[in-house]
Amino acid sequence: MTFGAAGGQDMGSRTRTPAVEPMVLVAIALGGGLGTLARFGLGALWPVLPGRFPWSTFVINVFGCFLIGILMFLITEVWVAHRLLRPFAGVGFLGGFTTFSTYCLEIRRLLESDETAVALGYLGGTVVAALAAVVLGMTTARLVTR
């Protein structure tokens, strides 16, 4: 018994079809590594102070969402993109650059240090700013490519 690409049982075949093409995984891994290094570098230049609003993470996440808006507009409406561009740049680089796991950890730390107002402002402010940044990125790309 083997499993095909859709995850179902395939009784007539003895081969296993990979769920994701290996080159897509390589593109995601390379992009993710580079995005993570970029975020680490910016974070090192602008560290988060305990009990304070985490501006560096906020700016990194919002800027990353702005870039995601630009990228997604360009590869869906302007370019015929190479098949590995979206996995490398969107999922990999920008997925590694933005850091919503750190965002959640910082909210928890703010709550634990009784900075509830800052934590809630950061929680809501990041969501609103990130969504607005995606729309702004898409709008900017649309205006520039007219």
Image (cartoon, rainbow, N blue to C red):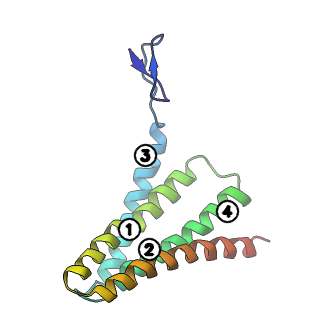
The residue sitting at 26% across, 87% down in the picture is 115
Question: Label 2 amino acid?
Answer: Asn
Looking at the image, do the residues carrying marks 4 and 3 touch, with CB atoms under 8 Å apart?
A: no
Between disc 4 and disc 3, whose residue precedes?
3
The residue sitting at 32% across, 82% down in the picture is 119
- Residue receiving disc 2: 61
Task: Give residue 47's mark.
Answer: none
Task: Give residue 26's mark.
Answer: 3
Task: Give residue 100's mark.
Answer: 1
* For discs 1 and 4, the disc positioned in front in the rendered view: 1
Question: Label 1 amino acid?
Answer: Phe
Residue 15 location (% of width, % of height): 43, 18
Judge left or right: residue 48 versus residue 60. left
Judge left or right: residue 84 versus residue 108. right
* For discs 4 and 3, the disc positioned in front in the rendered view: 4
Asked if one can make out residue 53 in the rendered structure from this viewpoint, the answer is no
Rendering quarter of residue 54: bottom left
Secondary structure type for disc 2: helix
